[in-house]
């Protein structure tokens, strides 16, 4: 019997493989015959280039979906783009089929400008997975507790700076956020003016603007342009890209060199980078340094504070309710700490409503497919760029009635954060395996800054020459961050 079994096993394996190949091939053949999702008719060569919305694309895509349905197909310069305006489709594809939908579009421009080492733009695969695991090790809910003291300290700095220049809130917020990120990630103090590390960070941030300018956009579609010799007329953009590579490399390396020098002099550094360096020196593997690149979080949090301040100036009743809650829970004698979050549901509801009301990343970050897929009878080809209209999901009047109004109460039931209410705006942090790994850290920062400001300041709109309040009209800008 055992002999017979061992003879049967290879036969079964080969048989199984043949059946598997037959089905995958016929599935592939079938999917190739399926239609693409509907969309505007494409022109030869340029495809839907002229249909691709230049301003507020999230609004244009929502309107397009009224004609073509929840999943729209566009083809721009040979690139297949699928726009998901339907929340269920976004969950079905980006969350439930995350293993197919978690890559990123290849971007020659990111490489040419020196941003290609960033985890956020890496294609799906071992290399990305390794970076993501390393990042998560330092930013999972348990790990971030050790950064709370640093976040609270930066909130106090924010208050004292706001007290000095209350009308110029943007600089104090940016300074405090940078101080918090520098403290958490590198354990380095930040000078009040002209901090060398912050200067490098700011310079690197400004290189992102290069992505949207003239010839650079062309390079994205025609990477061969990057090989033109620099003496050729009209190639200034190549010099700017080379400059950008230098700046982004400096951002990656400068703070590391600082803490390396400090630690070599015997200083204890318990920050994320300090812990990594400690491990590196223990295991003598210099290459481990690569996994630390992701400690640099995106500063989109700053925009959310601007939206929060705007909402508070437009909705004084909401502000008053939050202040009453803070007075009741904390009294007048102390400032909030991150540990107070659960006792302050109204403030937490304000955070959720800010993330929903002003969707900082209205179209999220584009995903890309790894293989052909079939959904609702449509083919989503391998290599498609998949864009989820996060703004449309968070402004769907059926889910969030009066979506343009700021109503934190929509997340509360009997004064408590409920579970049967409209969904939390978690999609503001993205989808599936690419969901923002800094979200727990970001939430803690949002809470401590918002609670601290609400407990100590009254936020009012600016006034005109006659002392009358000027009503500010929110006007989102077009880009990855709006
Ligand atoms: C409220 C503030 C923030 C918002 C709304 C936000 C939102 C997002 C979104 C929409 C994505 C793309 C997700 C996707 O592709 O589906 C993302 C990715 C990412 N975020 Fe955040 N983020 C915030 C703060 C942060 C912070 C503070 C950090 C760092 C500590 C961070 C680190 C990252 C990283 C590393 C990625 C790339 C993940 C990957 O590609 O695998 N984010 N974020």
Image (tube, rainbow, N blue to C red):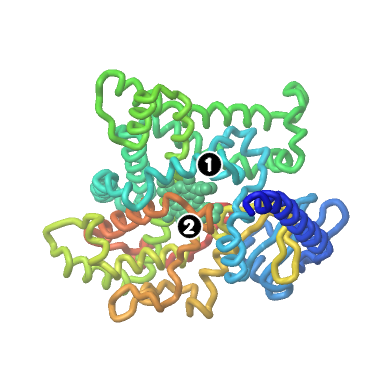
Kindly give the residue lying farthest to the top in the view shown.
Answer: 265
- Identify which residue is drawn at 36% across, 38% down: 185
Provide residue 336's location: percent of width, then percent of height.
21, 57
In the rendered image, the vertical position of residue 141 relative to residue 181, given as above or below = below
Provide residue 110's location: percent of width, then percent of height.
62, 38
In the rendered image, the vertical position of residue 147 relative to residue 65, given as above or below = above
Report whether 259 appears left or right of 215: left
Among the 4 quarters of the image, the one containing residue 178: top left
State the residue position of label 2: 429
Regarding residue 466, the answer to whether it shows in the image is: no
Helix, strand or loop at label 1? It is helix
Provide residue 324's location: percent of width, then percent of height.
21, 71
Helix, strand or loop at label 2? It is helix
Kindly give the residue lying farthest to the front in the view shown.
Answer: 1
Closer-to-camera residue (117/245)? 117
Residue 91 numbered mark, or none: none
Report whether 314 appears left or right of 12: left
State the residue position of label 1: 119
């Amino acid at each position: 019997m055992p002999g017979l079994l061992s003879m049967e096993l290879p036969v079964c394996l080969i048989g199984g493989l043949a059946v598997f190949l037959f089905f995958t091939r016929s599935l592939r053949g079938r999917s190739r015959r399926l239609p693409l999702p509907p969309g505007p008719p494409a022109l030869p060569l340029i495809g839907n280039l002229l249909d691709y919305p230049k301003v507020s694309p999230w609004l244009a895509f929502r309107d397009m979906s009224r004609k073509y349905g929840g999943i729209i197909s566009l083809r721009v310069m040979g690139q297949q783009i699928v726009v998901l305006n339907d929340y269920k489709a976004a969950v079905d594809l980006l969350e439930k089929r995350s293993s197919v939908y978690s890559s990123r579009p290849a971007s020659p421009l990111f490489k040419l400008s020196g941003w290609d080492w960033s985890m956020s733009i890496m294609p799906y695969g071992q290399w990305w997975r390794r970076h993501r695991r390393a990042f998560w090790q330092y930013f999972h809910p348990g790990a971030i507790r050790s950064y709370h003291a640093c976040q609270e300290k930066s909130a106090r700095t924010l208050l004292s700076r706001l007290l000095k220049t209350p009308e110029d809130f943007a600089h104090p917020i940016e300074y405090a956020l940078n101080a918090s990120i520098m403290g958490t990630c590198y354990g380095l103090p930040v000078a009040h003016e002209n901090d060398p590390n912050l200067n490098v960070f700011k310079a690197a941030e400004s290189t992102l603007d290069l992505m949207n300018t003239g010839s650079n956009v062309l390079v994205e579609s025609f990477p061969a342009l990057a090989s033109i010799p620099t003496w050729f007329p009209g190639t200034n953009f190549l010099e700017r890209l080379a400059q950008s590579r230098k700046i982004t490399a400096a951002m990656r390396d400068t703070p590391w060199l600082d803490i390396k020098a400090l630690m070599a002099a015997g200083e204890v550094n318990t920050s994320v980078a300090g812990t990594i360096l400690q491990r590196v020196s223990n295991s003598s593997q210099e290459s481990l340094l690569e996994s630390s690149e992701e400690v640099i979080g995106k500063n989109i949090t700053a925009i959310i504070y601007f939206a929060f301040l705007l909402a508070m100036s437009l909705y004084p009743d909401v502000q008053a309710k939050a202040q009453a809650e803070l007075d009741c829970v904390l009294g007048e004698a102390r400032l909030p700490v991150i540990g107070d979050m659960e006792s302050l549901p109204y403030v937490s509801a304000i955070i959720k409503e800010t993330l929903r009301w002003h969707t900082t990343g209205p179209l999220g970050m584009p995903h890309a497919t790894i293989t052909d897929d079939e959904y609702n009878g449509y083919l989503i080809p391998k290599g498609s760029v998949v864009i989820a209209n996060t703004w449309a999901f968070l402004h769907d009047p059926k889910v969030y009635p009066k979506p343009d109004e700021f109503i934190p109460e929509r997340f509360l039931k009997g004064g408590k954060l409920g579970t049967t209410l409209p969904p939390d705006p978690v999609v503001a942090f993205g989808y599936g395996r690419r969901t923002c790994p800094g979200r727990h850290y970001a939430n803690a920062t949002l809470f401590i800054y918002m609670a601290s400001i609400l407990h100590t300041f009254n936020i009012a709109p600016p006034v005109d020459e006659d002392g009358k309040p000027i009503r500010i009209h929110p006007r989102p800008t077009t880009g990855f961050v709006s």
